[in-house]
Amino acid sequence: MSALRLVRSVWRSFLFFALLVAAVVDCRIRRPKVGAEGAVWIHGWCRRIVGVLGFRCEVEGRVPRGAAVVSNHLSYLDILLYSSMQPFVMVAKTEVRGWPLLSWLTAQAGTVYVQRGGGPKTWPGVNAAMAEAYRSGLPVLFFPEGTTTDGAGVLPFRRGLFHSVLDNGGFVADCGAAIHAGERCGESRRFGG
């Protein structure tokens, strides 16, 4: 890695962290409601962060509203990039609750936390949380592969969250992510239906 790329990487990491701290301060001042209002608030901050970091997002197709949106999962940046496009209720693993700054921010956005491998004993709680998320009117985004991949293929889907879609009479919109790296990295999203 060249010295210039290293400096740029450190600078972008600093900006990202500074913007996360600014978002926490802003949330303490404005105090958006948890849930849909929080997701709209997070959307604004994600747009700022994506802009400052120099990412470019392109959407092909119509972004669905009030649906379950399923996507491949290439990196943790997927969440930031999706949220920059429009407000979403996200589904995350329970471990995210323990992450500094991000745990509090994701809770404000009404994130549904899922214990991976929790089995049938966790289904009623997850289904209730997902039903609440669908009632918000925002799309609910989850990554059914359950992990990040390099994007070369698709892993088998974990089917647990699809039950909540069926239980709530919802529909699923598929979407795919692709990262195009160059002088400036960007990410594209393609929405299906």
Image (cartoon, rainbow, N blue to C red):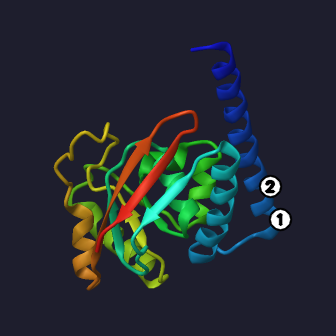
Classify mark 2: helix, strand or loop.
helix
Quarter of the rendering containing residue 127: bottom left
Residue 172 percent location from the top left of the image: 28, 73
Q: Report the amino acid beneath label 2.
A: Val
Q: Nearer the viewer, residue 38 or 45?
A: 45
- Report the residue that reaches farthest toward the front: 183
The residue where tag 1 is placed is 29
Residue at 75 percent of width and 70 percent of height: 31
Q: Is residue 158 visible?
A: yes
Q: Nearer the viewer, residue 109 or 119?
A: 109
Q: Which of the image's four quarters has the C terminus?
A: bottom left
On screen, 177 above or below 43? Answer: above
Q: Report the amino acid beneath label 1.
A: Ile
Mark 2 burial class by Cα count in 10 Å: few <14, some 14-19, many 20+? few
Residue 29 percent location from the top left of the image: 83, 65
Classify mark 1: helix, strand or loop.
helix
Mark 1 burial class by Cα count in 10 Å: few <14, some 14-19, many 20+? few
Residue 15 is left or right of residue 93, and the answer is right
Q: Nearer the viewer, residue 183 or 110?
A: 183
Residue 160 is left or right of residue 61, and the answer is left
Residue 150 percent location from the top left of the image: 32, 36
Q: Are marks 1 and 2 in contact (CB under 8 Å)?
A: yes
Q: Which of the image's four quarters has the N terminus?
A: top right
Q: Is residue 112 visible?
A: no
Residue 82 percent location from the top left of the image: 49, 59
Residue at 26 percent of width and 50 percent of height: 145
Residue at 27 percent of width and 79 percent of height: 171
The residue where tag 2 is placed is 25
On screen, 163 above or below 119? Answer: below
Q: Nearer the viewer, residue 149 or 135?
A: 149
